[in-house]
Amino acid sequence: MDSGHMVRTESTVEVCKYGCFAFLLLFLLPFSAARADEMKSTVIIHDSRIDVFIEAAAAPLSQPEVMKWVESAAESVVAYYGHFPVPHLTLRVFSFDGSGVRHGMTWGREGGLIRIDAGSRTSEAEFADDWTLTHEMIHLAFPSMMGEEHHWIEEGLSVYIEPIARIRAGHWTARQMWSDLVRDMPKGLPREGDEGLDHTHTWGRTYWGGALFCFMADVEIRRRTKNRKGLEDAVRGILESGGDIRNDWELQKALKVGDQSAGVDVLEKLYADWKDKPIMVDLPAMWKLLGVELDGTTIRLNDGAPLAAVRRAIEMGTPGNKTGEGSAPPKSGGVASRPFAVFAGRTVGSN
């Protein structure tokens, strides 16, 4: 079963309604059209291979800058999971005349497939600041949900894990992440008429409601285990049990495997509470407990707060246990191993 995932950019909210057939058909059209001019390169990271096809018929893209962007995103995912989620990924980058990164989608077919748009005038700094490709790569590390009502967990995990993964790879800062979460996490709170995560399919509840679920699960796992385990142990356990995007799973199976891997029954109980009814979270109180303080427009991190150690472990992993106690060790040399690119030639009229 193919699984499509829409990005969380605000500008696409009105057109990116999940299941919008007409938009999806237009979005997939480039796959069926012949590509007149295409550049292929490969990134090798640990035991995984990422074949990157740069389609630049609309406007030329800088191959070195695109490849650096791909390597950075792959590094971030490895920093969180310990290895890249699938043995082989096909990444198709389509150009447009402009700047920035737009519209990403991920499928389980072809062993892993991502399609993403990048502007021909995107600067090196804009590529470095992009979160979209990391978000899409994180989708590879979780099974395709068999029910559309569970799309929120697929998107919520990617929204929540993406900035953490970039922090652990050294591509983002903790202060930037918490600033964004303080600003954006309220979008995931239930509104009037909400019927729980399984029944409220608005953009805010799908993306940020799912992220709020993951955040609360992460904090509770760390609290229950005295900070020895975290959400990464749960999702790594799911991945190591064969739960990547190439496989269709029921949500209950994923949550059960995640709880077993973390050693506490947090995910299943949280889902039982949140699936059918609105659950309010006192976010200002949570920020205070974690030591995330808003001073005007500036975020200050207070290491004297009651759950400051939990906050730091969310950012960088449990001290002395970066790969997660009980998790499989990183493949081929550890998280610190860097990807390298193999620049290949241009193909004309390739499919």
Image: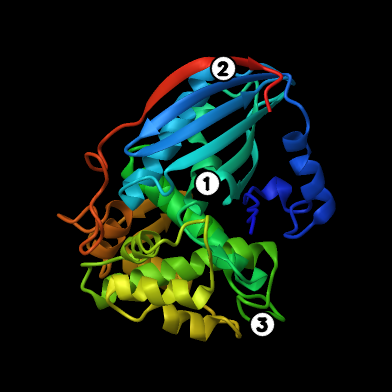
Q: Residue furthest left?
A: 320
Which residue appears at 67% of the width and 49% of the height? 10
> Looking at the picture, which amino acid does disc 2 mark?
Ser
Question: Residue at horizontal 75%, vertical 34%?
Answer: 30
In this rendering, does residue 112 appear at all?
Answer: no
Q: Secondary structure at mark 2?
A: loop
The image shows residue 152, relative to residue 88, as above or below, that is below
Using the image, determine if residue 278 lies above or below residue 205: below
Q: Give the mark nearer the N terminus: 1 vs 3.
A: 1
CB within 8 Å, label 1 to label 3: no
Counting residues from the start of the chain, the first of labels 1 and 2 encountered is 2
Residue at 58% across, 27% down: 53
Q: Nearer the viewer, mark 1 or mark 2?
A: 1
Q: Is residue 147 left or right of residue 282?
A: right
Instruction: Find residue 223 and report its image quarter.
Output: bottom left
Task: List the residue tagged with mark 2.
Answer: 62
Q: CA distance from mark 1 to mark 2?
A: 26 Å
Q: Residues within 10 Å of mark 2 (few under 14, many from 20)?
A: some
Residue located beneath label 3 in the image: 195
Give whichever of 104, 274 is nearer the camera.
104
Residue on which disc 1 sits? 111
Residue 58 location (% of width, % of height): 74, 21
